[in-house]
Image (cartoon, helix red, strand yellow):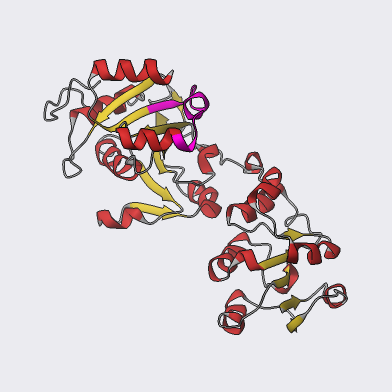
């Protein structure tokens, strides 16, 4: 049995030839819908999007997606420009909302044949996101011009250490730059007990950047979010252990072909310079930098400074000899 929540399209939805256990009409907040249906059993919930108060605010829909099983929800979109924009649709998909339509006659089909990501991937138009204008009043020596640098970090192998690396880079950079570190669609930064580390969701990332324009550098732990389009540079991290590499190749035996033009960094590595050369030959890739296991309790490590220097940060101190791994460069 199905639930119908209607407003503007009440008459159209009432004409559907489907089994309905409950139907409500009007305009509701997400909290009101949660109160009514959090413990209510149903097959599918068909929602006329105009029945949700402030539905054009994507953050409201995000609240809906957090509190309901979106695989059981079908959204009937209205004809407004905001809701039908590539950005809005792409953000729906980023939240795992795959069953949406502007055609009421499609709803009955979606009840029996729900969409997967594959069915809506062509609507996932990440190029529709608008990257904020960078602050031209901040001097950025990393580019040799005025602006701000946004660097993303993404694990290629499982648990390759992006979160800890971003944290270490921040505490090294902030000695000479104004730096923000942010993780997207995760909450792992909380374990560092550092309230200067930020956590945001991909939907609100644009707003986050707009409020951080006076920072020289923004370091982004990307996780699986689609916000890499905002980054000036993306670092792809590989932990070169045998098990992790075998898992990676079994998952996608073309992975190094796909990463050929990317900036690859070995992290948590025990490879020597000769080992790195062999790795490059066997994988057909070029390694940008080789970072060993690091002590995350140290705030001054020469290997981190050397890595930052290779990224173009000219103010970092390369004369420190406190690190144990100066050979990895």
Which quadrant does the C terminus fall into?
top left
Residue 156 found in image quarter? top left
Measuring from the top left, give residue 82's x and y in whole percent.
73, 55
Measuring from the top left, give residue 135's x and y in whole percent.
49, 37
Quick check: 326 left or right of 283? left
Which residues lie in the magenta part? 250-264
Quick check: 217 left or right of 206? left
Look at the image and tell me whether residue 148 can be seen: no
At x 65%, y 78%, the residue is: 42
At x 83%, y 74%, the residue is: 13
**Quick check: 242 above or below 62?**
above
At x 34%, y 39%, the residue is: 160
Q: Is 259 one of the magenta-colored residues?
A: yes
Q: Which of 165 and 117 is in front in this view?
A: 117
Residue 78 found in image quarter? bottom right
Residue 236 found in image quarter? top left
Measuring from the top left, give residue 41's x and y in whole percent.
62, 81
Q: Which of 103 and 175 is in front in this view?
A: 103
Measuring from the top left, give residue 234's x and y in whole percent.
45, 33
At x 39%, y 18%, the residue is: 282
């Amino acid at each position: 049995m199905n639930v119908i929540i209607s407003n503007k399209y009440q008459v159209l939805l009432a004409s559907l030839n489907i089994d309905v256990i409950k139907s409500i009409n009007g305009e509701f907040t997400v909290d009101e819908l949660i109160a009514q249906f959090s413990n209510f059993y149903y097959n599918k919930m068909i929602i006329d999007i105009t029945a949700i108060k402030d539905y054009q605010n994507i953050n409201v829909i995000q609240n809906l997606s957090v509190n309901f099983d979106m695989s059981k929800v079908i959204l009937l979109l209205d004809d407004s420009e905001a809701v039908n924009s590539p950005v809005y649709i792409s953000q729906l998909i980023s939240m795992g909302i795959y069953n949406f339509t502007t055609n009421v006659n499609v709803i009955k089909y979606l009840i029996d044949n729900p969409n997967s990501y594959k069915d809506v991937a062509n609507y996932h138009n990440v190029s529709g996101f608008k990257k904020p204008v960078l602050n031209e009043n901040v001097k950025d020596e990393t580019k040799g011009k005025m602006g701000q640098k946004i660097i993303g970090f993404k694990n290629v192998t499982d648990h390759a250490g992006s979160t800890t690396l971003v944290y270490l880079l921040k505490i090294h950079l902030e000695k000479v730059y104004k730096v923000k570190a942010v993780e997207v669609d995760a909450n792992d930064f909380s374990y560092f007990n550092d309230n200067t580390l930020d956590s945001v969701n991909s939907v609100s990332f644009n707003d986050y950047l707009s409020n951080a324009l006076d920072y020289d550098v923004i370091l982004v732990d990307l996780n699986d979010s689609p916000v890499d389009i905002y980054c000036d540079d993306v670092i792809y991290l590989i932990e070169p252990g045998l098990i992790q590499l075998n898992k990676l190749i079994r998952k996608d035996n073309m992975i190094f072909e796909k990463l050929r033009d990317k900036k690859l960094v070995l992290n948590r590595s025990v490879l020597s310079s000769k080992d790195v050369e062999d790795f490059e030959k066997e994988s057909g890739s070029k390694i940008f930098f080789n970072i060993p296991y690091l002590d995350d309790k140290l705030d001054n490590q020469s290997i981190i400074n050397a890595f930052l220097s290779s990224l173009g940060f000219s103010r970092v101190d390369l004369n420190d000899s406190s690190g144990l791994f100066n050979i990895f460069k």
